[in-house]
Image: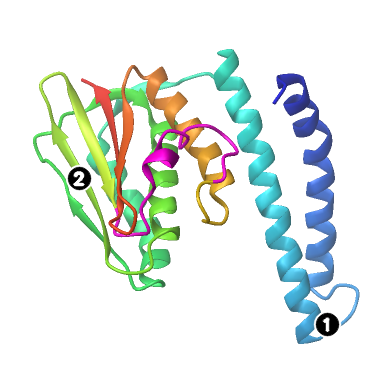
Amino acid sequence: MKLSFVSMLYHRMGGSVTSLKEGVDIVRDELVGPLTDKQRDCLDLAHRGAEELTDLINDAFCLQNLDEGKTVFHIESVNINNMIEQIREVMIDKAVGKGLNIKLNLDNNITEVKADRLKIDRVINDILENAIYFTDQGEIEIVTKSCSSDIQASIKDSGVGIKEDDIKRLFVPFQRLGDQPKTDGATLSLAICEKIILAHHGKIWVESEPSKGTTFYFTLPK
């Protein structure tokens, strides 16, 4: 994908999609007249599609900026355990809605690290959101531990798992993995996660087996 095309997509289509969403919202709010239940369902579907397209455009532009070194990182002292606890509070309702639990096993000996809070927040949130999406039963466990030169965090699910051949393409954007739907968007977000962790001089990797769940790991230097 050419970078110039991504810029065009972001600047031209972004505004068009925003206008589309605003138009759909006006009709959904019945500002131009009452709706039938079937009409509302169709508009809800259009609204979700527009939101997904907006996220896709924004992520493509974000990845381009990371590739080009244009992304600004605001480094500060962050407590990874506190971040995980806050993200769990936000995501727990979505997990419970699928009959899942989010279990925390956090190392109390972990000290603060220097990192961009918002970008590490995105990494944790994106991986956790994927774990919830691809898991239909069981639980998700988030673990942190302090190592000699870094801290390590892992997010383990009991979902569908990933084939070995697909693991190799997991951090390559716009890859469709196996027969799972919407993995092309997931690999885009994971490509961004990888760039963010590498920019912090950390590591990110995954261990998985089909039907046995998946565990994502990442590290941040102390």
Identify whether 177 is placed above or below 171: below
Left or right placement of residue 82 versus residue 195 in this view? left
Taking the spot 27% from the left edge, 63% from the top edge, the residue there is 139
Residue 133 location, quadrant: bottom left
Mark number, residue 198: none
Q: Nearer the viewer, residue 30 or 36?
A: 36
Asked whether the residues under the numbered discs 2 and 1 touch, taking CB atoms below 8 Å apart as contact, a structural biologist would say no
Q: Which residue is label 1 attached to?
A: 35
Residue 68 location, quadrant: top right
Taking the spot 68% from the left edge, 61% from the top edge, the residue there is 48
Q: Which residue ends up furthest to the right in the rendered image?
A: 32
Element assignment for label 2: strand
Q: Which residue ends up furthest to the top in the rendered image?
A: 69
Which amino acid lies under the numbered mark 1 shown in the image of this protein? Leu
Find the magenta span and give its range: 157-176
Q: Is residue 171 magenta?
A: yes
Identify whether 19 is placed above or below 34: above
Which amino acid lies under the numbered mark 2 shown in the image of this protein? Val
Element assignment for label 1: loop
Decide: few, some or many residues near mark 1? Use Cα within 10 Å; few <14, some 14-19, many ≥20.
Answer: some
Q: Nearer the viewer, residue 180 or 50?
A: 180
3D distance between C-alphas at marks 2 and 1: 47 Å
Say which of marks 2 and 1 sits in front: 2
Q: Which residue is label 2 attached to?
A: 143
Taking the spot 36% from the left edge, 70% from the top edge, the residue there is 96
Decide: few, some or many residues near mark 2? Use Cα within 10 Å; few <14, some 14-19, many ≥20.
Answer: some
Left or right placement of residue 150 versus residue 199 in this view? left
The main secondary structure of the magenta stretch is loop
Image quadrant holding the N terminus, namely top right
Closer to the chain start, of discs 2 and 1, is: 1
Q: Nearer the viewer, residue 102 or 183?
A: 183
